[in-house]
């Protein structure tokens, strides 16, 4: 099974972040601009202090009748951030996200933010890996043993 570090090597490790004092409007604007569903929230010294997602916005701004321009990220962000390390397997990340009912997972290496993965990233990785196994099995059945096991 692939590791999170392998997934990040293919996907890239760009992480989009905002500060806790930014407005929710600025955060949602950045999500739209970058095409992502969540942002990490970093303190001034670069420490991960939270995560804000479209779900947080829907539940804690829209449904509460608040203004996204007048609400700070710190008011609605998730503070107890669940994260994973790059050495963990993709299926471990899938299990963690499923159990915690979350869609985005920061990747922390040596106490530093090194990437962000989504449920979609994990599904794509698993499908790619299964396609590779299927291709190897088809080659084996056809007697094309060169490259099997690589």
Image (cartoon, helix red, strand yellow):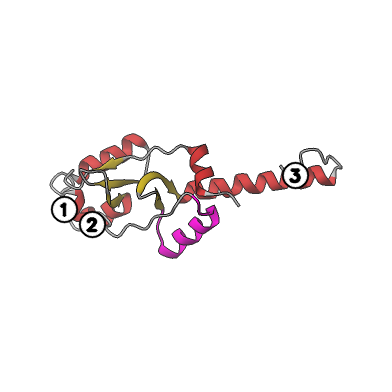
* Rendering quarter of residue 31: top left
Which numbered disc covers residue 142?
A: none
Give the image location of residue 33, x and y in percent: 32, 34
Q: CA distance from mark 2 to mark 3?
A: 48 Å
> In this image, 65 relative to 52: left or right?
left
The answer to which of marks 3 and 1 sits earlier in the sequence is: 1
Q: Secondary structure at mark 2?
A: helix
Packing grade of label 1 (10 A; few <14, some 14-19, many >=20) is few
Name the residue nearer the viewer: 1 or 60: 1
Q: Residue 97 in magenta?
A: yes
- Is the C-beta separation of discs 2 and 3 under 8 Å? no
Give the image location of residue 30, x and y in percent: 28, 38
Magenta range: 87-103
The answer to which of marks 2 and 3 sits earlier in the sequence is: 2
Name the residue nearer the viewer: 17 or 112: 112
Q: Which residue is mark 3?
A: 136
Q: Which residue is mark 1?
A: 66
Q: Which residue extends farthest front?
A: 110
Q: Which residue is mark 2?
A: 60
């Amino acid at each position: 099974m692939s590791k999170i570090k392998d997934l990040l090597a293919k996907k890239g490790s760009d992480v989009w972040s905002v500060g806790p004092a930014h407005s929710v409007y600025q955060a949602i604007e950045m999500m739209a601009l970058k095409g992502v569903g969540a942002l990490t929230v970093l303190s001034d010294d670069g420490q991960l202090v939270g995560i804000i997602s479209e779900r947080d916005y829907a539940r804690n701004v829209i449904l509460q009748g608040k203004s996204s321009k007048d609400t700070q990220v710190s008011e609605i962000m998730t503070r107890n951030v669940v994260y994973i390390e790059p050495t963990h397997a993709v299926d471990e990340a899938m299990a963690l996200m499923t159990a915690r009912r979350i869609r985005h997972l920061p990747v922390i290496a040596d106490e530093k933010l090194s990437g962000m993965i989504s449920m979609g990233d994990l599904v794509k990785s698993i499908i790619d890996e299964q396609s590779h196994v299927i291709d190897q099995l088809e080659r084996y059945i056809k007697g094309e043993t060169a490259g099997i096991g690589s």
